[in-house]
Amino acid sequence: MGKDTNLQTIGDNMTKEEIIDKIHNGGKRMPQVGRSMEEGDIDKVAEWLSTLKSNAAESANEPAA
Ligand code: HEM
């Protein structure tokens, strides 16, 4: 997450499980944000992010096409 990343359609590329791993482990530049989060919140945010798809026109996050 940050200016070089865009999570708005992350569900096209990552599963919930992969997002959970990312939150726990971070990356080259992403910190291990899971260290300061409740496990239940990690699960919930990963669940939600995994539903964000570019073709989800009915999504509450996207304007109607
Ligand atoms: C709950 C909070 C966060 C979530 C759910 C999250 C989630 C993600 C995900 C799913 C990716 C992969 C994106 C992709 O491959 O296209 C990513 C990448 C990244 N995130 Fe986050 N992120 C969070 C917080 C942060 C914070 C606080 C920072 C920096 C201070 C950060 C910096 C980055 C960077 C730089 C990347 C690019 C890959 C890397 O260098 O590790 N993220 N994030």
Image (spheres, grey):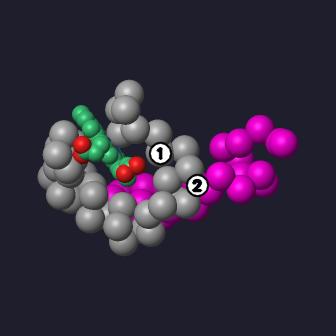
Q: Secondary structure at mark 2?
A: loop
Q: Residues within 10 Å of mark 1 (few under 14, many from 20)?
A: some
Mark 1, ligand 1, within 8 Å: the answer is: yes
**Mark 2 surroundings: few (<14), some (14-19) or many (≥20) residues within 10 A:** many
Report whether residue 63 is seen.
Answer: yes
Secondary structure found at label 1: loop
Q: Residue under label 2, please give it.
A: 52
Residue 53: say if magenta: yes
Q: Which residue is mark 1?
A: 7
The quarter of the rendered structure image containing the N terminus is top left
Say which quarter of the image contains residue 43. bottom left
Q: Which region shows up in magenta?
A: 39-65
Looking at the picture, tell me which residue is in the foreground, 3 or 36: 3
Q: Is residue 39 visible?
A: no
> Considering only order in the chain, which callout, 1 or 2, is on the residue closer to the N terminus?
1
Query: Which residue occupies 27% across, 58% down?
Result: 22
User: Is 15 positioned to the left or the right of 20 in the image?
Assistant: right
Does 3 sit above or below residue 55? Answer: above
Which residue sits at x=44%, y=63%? 14
In percent of the image, x 71 and y 56: which residue is there? Answer: 55
Residue sitting at the far right: 65
Farthest-out residue, top: 3
